Amino acid sequence: MFARQFKINFLRNLPISRYYPTYKRLLSASLTEGNVVVVQQPNGGEPLQFPSVWLRDNCQCSECFHDNTKSRQANWKRVNVESRIRSINGSHENNALTIDWQDDHKSTFTLAWLQDRDFAPTNRKRYIEEVYKPTYQLWAKSEFQNVLRTFEFKDVMTQDKVLLEWLESLAIQGFSIIKNSPHNITVVRQLADRIGYIKRTTYGEEFEVKSKDNARNYAYMMTPLPLHTDMPYYEYKAGINILHCLVQSQSQGGSNLMADGFYIAEKLRKEFPKLFEILVKTPVDWYDIGKDGDMSFHNIWRAPTICLDVDGRYHRINENSTKRDSHFTVPLEQVGPWYEAYDKFVELAYAEAVDFKIAPGDVFVFNNLRMLHGRTAYEDSPANKRHLIGAYVDWDIIYSKIRIIKNAINC
């Protein structure tokens, strides 16, 4: 009797997978009347849904897809919108779905491939935030010390994990400071090469920020430099600005100013929605006319102060009072309202601006599409002349590097 009761209790305590034969759901799929393929996952997760026209367009067979170049190589001239499915079969052995089409073509999709491309809102959100672009973090003046990230130059140059953290900080917080860089003029190029390559502009590849006689750019003077973004007059505006401090002013001035332009835009949206809409919809004429060395230039670009992307997220801030053209090519009745909105934007920006003073060996790096930056006035002396070296890198190159490192780490 005791032995029988022990056996019953023992069996009751066994995991179900040991007491009963293991049951595995098979990969299966069905077709709706709207030509949507519904895939039932073996693990019992939420069904995956894919339009049949999308599946046909993204067939992964060697006839339709060139794996070495990761390129679609069929249906270049027409999209086969009338493709119809003859049958769908799930394979448990290789965890794949095979579709026979009525035009006698056959497509096979692995479950992992389908899961990565699921049209469910949560998966689309995951892809946009984890693969496309990291989600930016808005911050106010009071939060500056909490969002400030610092990195060691040596670590950024030698450790991919630190490089990734640095680049993500530029995408998320919008700025960072690299400490203890060498005292030479090649630092900004070394950092740009670590990411990819420098963006060349009308001011060359590397540029010097120091006071110059007969300066042709407002940044090359000792006077206050107002909050601004660089190059609003470029259609393809420089992505990040890398500024390496070689010599800092020993005068009381020369401090850096910075405000989160995206935060300012969001504050304007919440508190003054009508003014926000004006700065989103009204194009402004930005320009830069001059000469740098032997290079003459005449750059013009028309764009609003606040630019949104296709998802309504903040994409680019254009603000530079020294580079705002006297030409204002909008209807007469839009001029007054724009100035009212612009005045409020600038007021909020200065109210939220932080000031700090980088030291020799510091590299101040920031998102030029987002951060408003400036500088207080300073005074050079024969023995002390403020001197920075700068360079730009495009965001396309940065986002590519982020994805490459993340893929390598996850392998």
Image: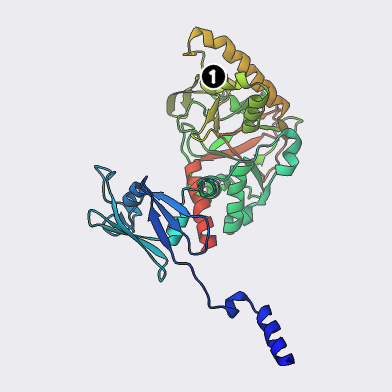
Q: Residue 110 falls in which quadrant of the image?
A: bottom left
Nearest the eye: 344 or 275: 275
Nearest the eye: 83 or 314: 83
Q: Which residue is mark 1?
A: 324
**Residue that lies at the very extreme toward the top in this rendered image:** 332
Nearest the eye: 135 or 274: 274
Q: Is residue 358 above or below residue 303?
A: below
* Residue 52: image location, x then y, percent: 35, 49
Residue drawn at x 57%, y 21% is: 277
- Quarter holding the N terminus is bottom right
Residue drawn at x 55%, y 46% is: 129
Residue drawn at x 74%, y 43% is: 146
User: How is this picture coloured?
Assistant: rainbow
* Residue 177: image location, x then y, percent: 66, 44
* Residue 293: image location, x then y, percent: 47, 29
* Residue 244: image location, x then y, percent: 62, 42
Q: Mark 1 packing: few (<14 Cα in 10 Å), some, or many (20+)?
A: some
Q: Is residue 194 left or right of residue 166?
A: left
Secondary structure at numbered mark 1? loop
